Image: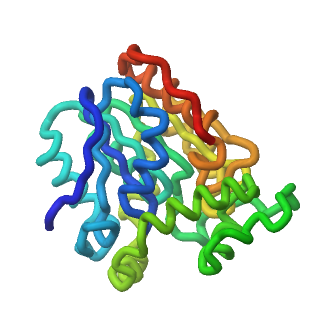
Amino acid sequence: MSVVAETHGSGLPMLCLPGFSLARSAMVAALEPALAAGPGVRRIYLDLPGTGQSPGGPPNSDGVLDWIGEVVDREIGSEPFLVAGWSYGGYLAAALARRRPEQVGGLLLICHGTKILRADRDVPVAPVVSEEADWLVEVPPDLRAHLAVALGNRTRETAGRVAGVLVASGPGDEEYLERLRAGYQLADEDSTLVFSGPTSIVTGRQDYIAGYADQFRALARYPSASYAVLADAGHYLPFEQPEAFRGLILDWLARCGVPLGGPPFPPSSD
């Protein structure tokens, strides 16, 4: 199966895995505002099977993880690397660290699932939160129901930003992705193996998709982890709280030993 990847920067390899059904462009949009101006990491953004330009392939998540391992062997080899994953990508990233603990030098988990089956997740009950009037009015109609659940920062600006990312990502191979859901759960999901490398777990207080409680309980498996739950943020936290997210990434990279010299980060345009 061919590998569709996009590489930015130079230095320590960093594998970047997007959420389920999202193309690599979504992960680029999430991470590059914090990484483009200087940190010495070579970001490798993947289109997972059935997304972006990658065709469908493995029938289950264990097969997808094996495919990622083959990408690592071809693109990175045996040298150490960092791995960052968002949502389903974080679910896979955590498993990759379990299976390659000697090679993975650091782990960034963004609104990731620890339990992939929805019925097994501990997600918060949706409270009444403040929202801007008609905050979804400019969002494509087919995305409104999803964003009404997924977003904690409920403004027109945030909704438009996230909708733009989702539209740019494209639909993917929907037939393949639907089949993949039947084999969604990794065989070692309940593993208690410890990953001792620098880890950052970032969650949203209003994430009604992945939650934040399961991730807190998972800290026992990450003795070198920091944990953050951000208010007014849901499942699309990188676009809902970009300044706070940028700071958390830089803290993680510093703990991974990445030199953060170079020119100052440009001010956010958000």
The residue depicted at 24 percent of the width and 53 percent of the height is 5
> Is there any visible trace of residue 128 in the rendered image?
yes
Residue that lies at the very extreme toward the top in this rendered image: 261
Q: Nearer the viewer, residue 164 or 126?
A: 164
Q: How many marks?
A: 0
Q: Is residue 150 left or right of residue 113?
A: right
Q: Nearer the viewer, residue 188 or 179?
A: 179
x, y percentage for residue 92?
A: 38, 55
Q: Tell me where residue 140 appears, x and y as whole percent.
A: 61, 75
* Quadrant position of the C terminus in the picture: top right
In this picture, is 269 found above or below 261? below
Q: Is residue 62 above or below residue 87?
A: below
Residue at x-position 14% and y-position 36%: 78
Indicate the position of residue 33 as horizontal and vertical percent values: 48, 38
Q: Residue at x 38, y 32 (%)?
A: 106
| Place of residue 31 in the rendered image (x, y in percent of width and height, measured from the top left) | 45, 42
**Quarter the N terminus occupies:** bottom left
Residue drawn at x 47%, y 52% is 86
Specify whether residue 101 is in view: no
Observer-nearest of 139 and 4: 139
As drawn, is 230 to the left or to the right of 192?
Answer: right
